[in-house]
Amino acid sequence: MSDPNAAARAVVFALLAAPLLAGALPARAASFDCGKPDLAADEATICQTLSLNDMDVKMVTTFELLSGLLAMGSRGELQDQQIAWLSKRGECKADVDCLTAAYAARMAQLTSVYEGIERPK
């Protein structure tokens, strides 16, 4: 027996998948717009390197989640640390190894902050 909705589902899938497969959607990292004309060297490298883009997504998601869990004073400290880290990341320029190490170090810091959150017993 033939599925009468199969053709309709195939059309919908093709319409939704076409822009993704064609690369029509703008490239975007989690923490900045890859379409900006004045990207810094570190940002351009992150946009062009899938593994770095994935690290950026993970890092900013973790940062935002932690920001919501922390009290105001701790949140401000976390934001100050993020600003300092972004400046340090910028020093890597287009060096993929340096950027990879910077993200690994920042994720270790964020993990440490998370592990330090006092939980109800």
Image (cartoon, rainbow, N blue to C red):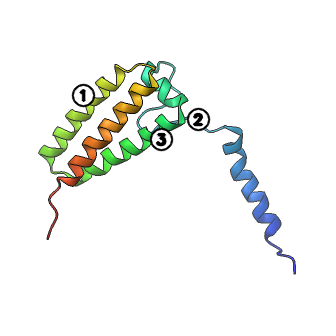
Dot 1 amino acid type: Ala
Instruction: Please tell me which residue is depicted at 36% across the width and 42% down the height of the picture.
Output: 60
Residue 121 image offset from top left, x and y in percent: 14, 71
In the picture provided, is 35 more to the left or to the right than 107?
A: right
Instruction: Please tell me which residue is depicted at 43% across the width and 40% down the height of the picture.
Output: 55
Task: Answer with mark 2 or mark 3, whichever residue precedes in sequence.
Answer: 2
Q: Which mark is residue 54?
A: 3
Q: Which mark is residue 84?
A: 1
Quadrant housing residue 108: top left
* Label 1 residue SS: helix
Residue 16 image offset from top left, x and y in percent: 69, 52
* Label 3 residue SS: helix
Task: Tell me the CA gap for discs 1 and 2.
Answer: 28 Å
Mark 1 crowd level (few <14, some 14–19, many ≥20, 10 Å Cα): few
Which residue carries the number 2 mark? 26
Instruction: Please tell me which residue is depicted at 46% across the width and 21% down the height of the picture.
Output: 39
